[in-house]
Image: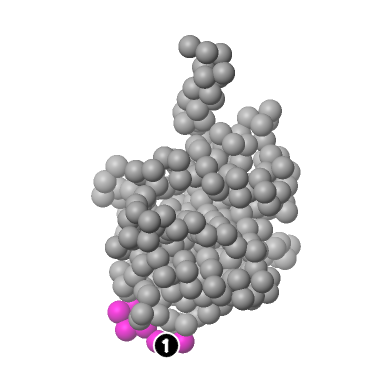
């Protein structure tokens, strides 16, 4: 075996076998917007969670020899009904640390009237708190506080884009006035819109209920919430996605472009929903984008 090939294999193996350094409570104290409940966290299938009431961040740090100082909060999807924690969360974190990017996998609360006073804001509170914890812990983890991104898949992409467009109003305690704005966003086959023409109905029903108000539909349709300070964006999606229509990404791209927000979109002709499980090379163009935009230089 050639030395260069052997080195590549060893690096890949090291990255994919990376272990979390720690799992920390997302909230050091009381979880906001929570109410007493008998709901228990369960795994309906391996690596998939629901019923989480005490959200966490699982921390993956790259070896110091390759660390770039960049960090990403990773938000798995699951239609706001489950959290695909292992496949979209841990698997992605291991790929990120291999490239020198610190990863923080968010196990967030799913919207629930049983566990929350207001279920429509519960997941967003957790996303805001995740950015806050990572930014405030930047020195501890060897992170540049100006290079903290957010990455979401499917409904996790909706949550990530919600945090990237709703960061100015803090829904959590923030006495230090820490910036809740992600420096960039990566949205993989994301739910973006909750309007009738584009919505993934399961995600919308779980987040807003079966008869949501027009105000809430528009508030959480994130293509309508883009502003001049919305973070730069990377959007991969498959044209044949039968679960979340690719028009979600296209509409968001167009809105960002017209607002002059730096945005790059990759539309693959095939792959359907969840293509990351069938196309392991999907993440390589993301690393190219990050390097070209000085996130990993």
- Classify mark 1: helix, strand or loop: helix
10 Å crowding of disc 1: few (<14), some (14-19), many (20+): few
Identity of the residue furthest to the left in this view? 44
Q: What residue is rendered at 30% in x and 69% in y?
A: 202
Residue at the (32%, 84%) spot, across then down = 211
Q: Nearer the viewer, residue 277 or 60?
A: 277
Q: Position of residue 221 (x, y in %)?
A: 47, 76
Q: Which residue is label 1 attached to?
A: 214
Q: Quadrant of residue 98?
A: top right
Up/down of 70 relative to 204, above or below: above
Q: Main secondary structure of the magenta part?
A: loop
In this orientation, which residue lies closer to the viewer: 253 or 163? 253
Q: Quadrant of the C terminus?
A: top right
Residue 58 visible in the shown view = no
Q: From where the camera sits, is residue 252 visible? A: yes
- Is the residue 87 above or below the residue 13 in the image? below
Name the side, left or right, on which 65 lies relative to 99. Answer: right
The image shows a total of numbered marks equal to: 1
Residue drawn at (60%, 63%) of the image: 263
Question: Does the magenta-highlighted stretch encompass residue 214?
Answer: yes
Q: Is residue 154 magenta?
A: no
Q: Residue furthest bottom?
A: 214
Q: Residue furthest top?
A: 1
How are the colours assigned in the image? one colour
Residue 266, x across and y down, in percent = 49, 56
Q: Which residues are magenta?
A: 208-215
Q: Residue at x 33, y 48 (%)?
A: 48
Image coords of residue 141 (percent x, y): 67, 40
Can you give x and y, in whole percent of width and height, for residue 107 in the image?
45, 52
């Amino acid at each position: 075996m050639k030395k260069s090939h052997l080195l590549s294999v060893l690096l890949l193996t090291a990255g994919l076998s990376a272990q979390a350094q720690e799992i920390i409570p997302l909230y050091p104290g009381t979880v906001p917007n929570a109410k007493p409940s008998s709901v228990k966290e369960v795994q309906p299938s391996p690596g998939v969670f629901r019923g989480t009431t005490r959200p966490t961040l699982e921390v993956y740090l790259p070896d110091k020899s390759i660390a770039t100082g960049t960090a990403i909060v990773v938000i798995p999807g699951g239609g706001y009904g489950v959290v695909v924690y292992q496949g979209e969360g841990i698997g992605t974190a291991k790929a990120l640390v291999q490239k020198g990017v610190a990863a923080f996998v968010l196990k967030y609360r799913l919207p629930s009237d049983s566990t929350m006073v207001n279920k429509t804001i519960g997941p967003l509170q957790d996303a805001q708190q995740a950015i806050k914890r990572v930014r405030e812990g930047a020195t501890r983890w060897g992170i540049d506080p100006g290079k903290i991104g957010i990455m979401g898949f499917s409904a996790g992409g909706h949550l990530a884009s919600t945090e990237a467009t709703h960061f100015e109003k803090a829904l959590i305690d923030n006495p230090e006035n820490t910036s809740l704005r992600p420096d960039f966003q990566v949205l993989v086959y994301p739910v973006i819109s909750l309007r009738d023409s584009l919505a993934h109905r399961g995600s919308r029903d779980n987040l807003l209920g079966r008869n949501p108000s027009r105000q809430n539909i528009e508030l959480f349709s994130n293509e309508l919430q883009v502003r001049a300070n919305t973070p730069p964006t990377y959007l991969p999606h498959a044209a044949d996605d039968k679960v979340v229509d690719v028009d979600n990404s296209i509409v968001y791209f167009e809105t960002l472009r017209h607002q002059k927000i730096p945005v790059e979109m990759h539309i693959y002709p095939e792959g359907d929903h969840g293509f990351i499980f069938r196309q392991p090379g999907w993440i390589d163009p993301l690393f190219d984008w990050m390097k070209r935009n000085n996130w990993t230089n």
